[in-house]
Image (cartoon, rainbow, N blue to C red):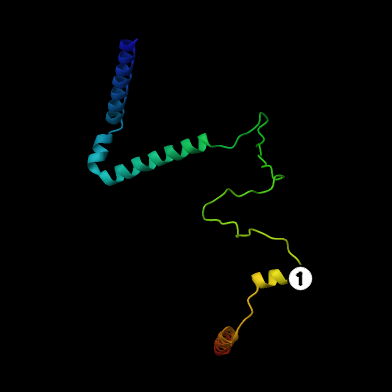
Amino acid sequence: MKGFTEKLLRAIQDFAAQFITALVDKLHLREAYEKNRTLFISVLALILVIILFSTVLILFRPKTTKDGALVTINPDITQPFVLPKEPSMNEEYYLSRPKNRVWDEEEAEKWFTIPDSAMMNQLENDNNRLIKNLLEASP
């Protein structure tokens, strides 16, 4: 069996070599390559890219039914979204929380920072700068 396989592969190689040689001689590719190498390589690369894209399009074309209609795949969205555990995400990170109209004291202490005088001065300076820029830009 091993001898047969080797003979078959050798026959395929010989056929391919003869076919390519005949094609090169018939189409005068050798002369075209020697005459203008850049153009020859560019055209060859373009042909290879077209073959590659055609192969990809054929392999990954949308699935169709027997009557030719496209099959749409709808994911199951009835299950709740669950993020995988990640080492960088700690338990204190909230993706969402229930929204209340009014915060209670504990939430206010946790989420709200009472501005001090330095923060208020910085806010005033930033607002004044924005107003000044706006007035200078107007005609």
Q: From this view, report whether residue 120 is shown above or below residue 5.
A: below
The x and y percentages for residue 34 are 22, 40
Residue placed furthest toward the right: 101
Q: Compare residues 34 and 69 and report the one nearer the observer.
A: 69
- The answer to whether 114 appears left or right of 99 in the picture is left
- Helix, strand or loop for disc 1: loop
Looking at the rendering, which quadrant does residue 47 occupy?
A: top left
Q: From this view, report whether residue 115 is shown above or below residue 54.
A: below
Query: Which residue was labeled with disc 1?
Result: 102
- The answer to whether 47 appears left or right of 76 in the picture is left
| Quarter of the figure that contains the C terminus | bottom right
The x and y percentages for residue 120 are 60, 85
Residue at 32 percent across and 18 percent down: it is: 9
Q: Amino acid at mark 1?
A: Val
Q: Compare residues 77 and 89 and report the one nearer the observer.
A: 89
Looking at the rendering, which quadrant does residue 14 occupy?
A: top left
Residue at 66 percent across and 28 percent down: it is: 66
